[in-house]
Amino acid sequence: MKTQAMTSGLRITLNKTELQALLKLARYGAEQVAAARHYYILPERQVALGTDVILGLEQGLTSLQWKQAEAKAMRDAPKREAERRAAREHHAQIDGYSVIGMLGDWTDISDNPDRHQWADMFHPDTKPREQGEIRRNVWRIFLSRGSASSDDLSVLPGDCTMTADRSEIASLARHIIARSQS
């Protein structure tokens, strides 16, 4: 607790524990005065002032708790964003290929009905074709092997799973790899 004398009063800085203790003490005192009015000789103005002090302490405690919650939310925001992103992304190594899966809503924009070319349905440049297939809340997978810097990069055409089940990613990736090797 810190105190600072001012010309018109006293400024007190309290931590949360001190504020809670002072609030309990003020409430207890107000209850005691109200329960035994004949023992205490207090002007009405002081009784009303006590109520105002309790109200001010309650508002201060609420404000402090709100600021602490905001600070905690700001500290935890990067962690929550990483968790949210991790829930919508999948990374794996399958048969020497890097597999990346992205959960979302996808539409087929290919002109050939026998071939799929998936695009993010909500991207502003995406124009779905007439009677094109739309898959909602599914994994779009991308497969690659090698490194672009050493000129041995090979990228396989990806596809979409049928459901949001993560286990379906591995089986679809193996199917695409087997199809490309035959």
Image (cartoon, rainbow, N blue to C red):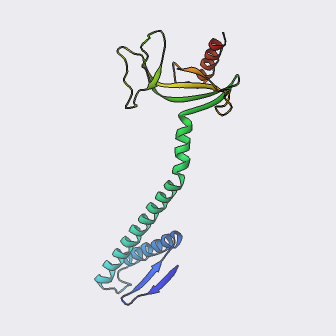
In this image, 132 relative to 3: left or right? Answer: left
Q: Position of residue 68 (x, y in %)?
A: 49, 61
In this image, 142 relative to 117: left or right? Answer: right
Residue at the extreme bottom: 7
Q: Is residue 150 above or below residue 178?
A: below
Residue found at x 64% / y 31%: 148
Residue at the extreme front: 151
User: Relative to the observer, which residue lies in front, 50 or 116?
Assistant: 116
User: Relative to the observer, which residue lies in front, 126 or 67?
Assistant: 126
The image quarter in which residue 141 lies:
top right
Residue found at x 56% / y 48%: 79
Q: Position of residue 143 (x, y in %)?
A: 60, 24
Q: Position of residue 108 (x, y in %)?
A: 43, 19
Residue found at x 65% / y 29%: 92
- Quadrant for the C terminus, please: top right
User: Relative to the observer, which residue lies in front, 152 or 22?
Assistant: 152
